[in-house]
Image (tube, rainbow, N blue to C red):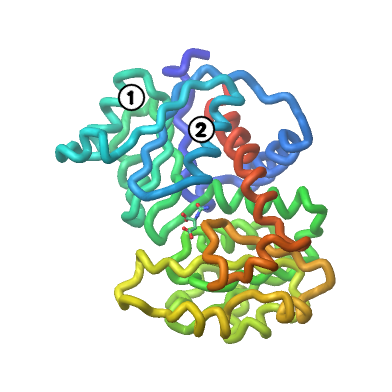
Amino acid sequence: MESSERPQRHLLTIESLAQKELDALIRRACELADGARPEKISAAVANLFFEPSTRTRVSFELAAARLGMTMVSIELDRSSSTKGESLEDTAATLAAMGIDGLVLRHPETGRPQRLAREVSPRLHLLNGGDGTGEHPSQALLDAATLVASGLDLGAATIAIVGDIRHSRVARSGLQLLSRLSVGELRIAGPAELLPEVVPVPGVIVCHSLDEALENADVVMMLRVQRERMDAAGWPDQAAYHGQWGLVESRLARAAPGCRVMHPGPINRGMEIAAAVADGPRSLILDQVRMGVFMRMAIFEWMFED
Ligand code: NCD
């Protein structure tokens, strides 16, 4: 099919995906990770990142390459946005050159949704993380990592710990895990880093790391996002590590074989000890690896005929 005839398909939030799409994306990423042959896709996409990124940006690039797509990553400090061009004009310019999809990372919450209302109907938008909003491809790759690890989601207790308030990974993750009917979902963190409103009903709020870890099958640690906070210098690294840092001895409270996750980038010695991040329970690099397969599955879904 000519790219101009494809129906417009965005991936902006977890909510916008139908249950069968969620299930199919997770299944497909796991198949690709198991060696299934990827489709060949004739489409051109651009990475447009207004915030730093290593794994998200590179995994979209690698995913596109493995599908035979054209991918350009735009370096914003060298692009016309530094001359005051609006995001809408940048998107229209790229679409006019034949770009079919844009992966957008932006510090403003809701910016991809706002752009989606303005872009040409032949441009597909993918949210690569918006402010403290959503990060749907990360949530999907995390769920696929757990499925591929053999976890029975329906019977599992999953705890997300750390800076929940500023985390788009937590926001998308909680929504997705709840739609996948995970047994029990917990969040925990210092009061200052808990959200005012729990994003998903039924989530248990814990007020200590030990409480969150009790018999948990999965613990996902989050980075403290200093760049989104007003109070300079808070929290102190050593104090945070003492209270909220995941160290080997505290993991004893969790279920045997508890899986440890972290979306990265990691602050070793702050939210997680190096020995745990590199230890046998850690799925951190499995998440990174699955990131490429999930982004391939997303591109296949987005550009399917
Ligand atoms: C996260 C992000 O940027 O939202 N990282 C990622 O995409 N893997 C989490 C973070 O910045 O801490």
x and y, in percent, of residue 220 in the image: 63, 65
In the image, residue 220 sits, relative to residue 89, either above or below, namely: below
> Which residue corresponds to the image point at 56% horizontal and 50% vertical from the top-left?
138
Q: Nearer the viewer, mark 1 or mark 2?
A: 2
Q: Amino acid at mark 1?
A: Ala
Secondary element type, mark 2: helix
Q: How far, Cα to Cα, is label 1 from label 2?
A: 18 Å
Label 1 residue SS: helix
Q: Amino acid at mark 2?
A: Glu
| 274 or 262: nearer the viewer | 274
Disc 1 target residue: 95
Q: 10 Å neighbourhood of mark 1: few (<14), some, or many (≥20)? A: many
Residue 303's spot in the image, x, y percent?
53, 26
Horizontal relation, residue 78 to residue 242: left or right: left
Residue at (56, 32) in percent of width and height: 62
> Which residue is rendered at x = 70% and y = 56% of the image?
283
Name the residue tied to disc 2.
Answer: 61
Q: Residue furthest top?
A: 2
Q: Residue 113, can we see it?
A: no
